[in-house]
Amino acid sequence: MDMSDTCEMRANAPCTANVTTPVEIYWPDHNRSESVGDMRFIAFERPMRPTWRKTHLEFQRAIHAAVCITSIATAVKISKGALALPTKFTHKPIPPQFRGDSGSEWEYVPEILDNWHGARPLCYSFGTQHHDEFTDFWTAAGCEVFAFDPTVSYYKLSNHPNLTFRSWGLRSAEDRSLEVHRTGDGNYGAISGELYSLSQIVSMLGHRGRSIAALKLDCEGCEFATFKELWCDPTLPPIMSINVEFHFRVDQRMVLPSDIERIRYVALYLGQHGFRSFQFATHAGTMFGYRGGPNFINPDLDAAGIKWDVCCYLHSFVNDRQLRNRTRS
């Protein structure tokens, strides 16, 4: 059994743990058992008021929904900005000078920089093209920044001592034969660089044992496979903040049932490590996709009410648990 199979079993375990556990419901007249869906309910003679019974069932349902993380429910939460509770830490937009117009679309948490101890903060920025305000900001802040984009061969600030650029990208599938290779369009170039897993990149750069202060994922569909890898591989570096664009369109690596299945690992990873939200926005889409074809989303997501005319959902998260520990030390 490989790590992927073990990881899937671990993700499924909370969904099956309680389905055979009796849930006590008190009926007023006689003893009986009721089967509702996959849950087994045992009824007892002692009566329970109807309002108490309803509250009890709602409580059990809420517990099951909280621990059984599914892909469709996670996708709906992503589209509504309800993936995590809001943080109480201060967050600010990246200053406008790093974008050159009215301001950046990305925000950051200043306390991360204020409370960083030891080696310089390490930052990974995936999806930069030739210029990127997120990358430039964290570079100017004195961090050790690694920028990645497999569609370009250089980055404008690549001669900065704090910045290292690699024409690498993140894989969107565990099986390389299922990888989607873009051939170029009006918005993005063809994928010419190598595609790796996050684990491979961390190892190649010698960053095992370090922490990542800021991770940006703007990679047009690789984000869900990356979150699955983060949740499944405990040897990957802990992360303090994540800025990410989530994409649901079929032309952005959301085609197969296995692509849908990976969505739930976003909620699994964020929940397990204590992340809170500090930014949410939607980017409007157009009738036609990046390669000229009509825009549409996976049928399962369409049935769940995910809008087809949204390009992506921008989210930012901070690891409240880690940051609180750093501010206390």
Image: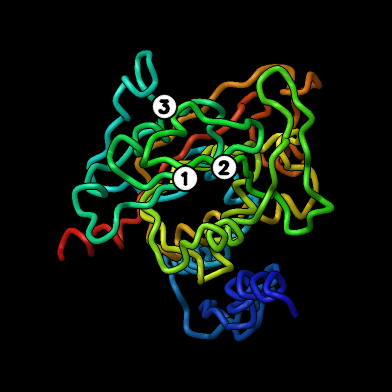
Identity, as a three-letter code, of the amino acid under mark 1: Phe
Where residue 217 sits in the image (x, y, percent)? 53, 42
Q: Is residue 247 visible?
A: no
Residue 280, image quadrant: top left
Residue that numbered label 3 is attached to: 105
Residue that numbered label 1 is attached to: 146
**First in sequence: mark 1 or mark 3?**
3
Identity, as a three-letter code, of the amino acid under mark 3: Glu
Q: Residue at x 64, y 53 (%)?
A: 225
Instruction: Determine crowd level at label 2: few under 14, some 14-19, many 20+ residues with C-alpha closer than 10 A.
Output: some
Please determine whether, in this image, residue 121 is positioned above or below residue 98: below
Identity, as a three-letter code, of the amino acid under mark 2: Arg
Where residue 236 sits in the image (x, y, percent)? 50, 65
**First in sequence: mark 1 or mark 2?**
1
- Is 256 situated left or right of 247 in this image? right
Residue that numbered label 2 is attached to: 166
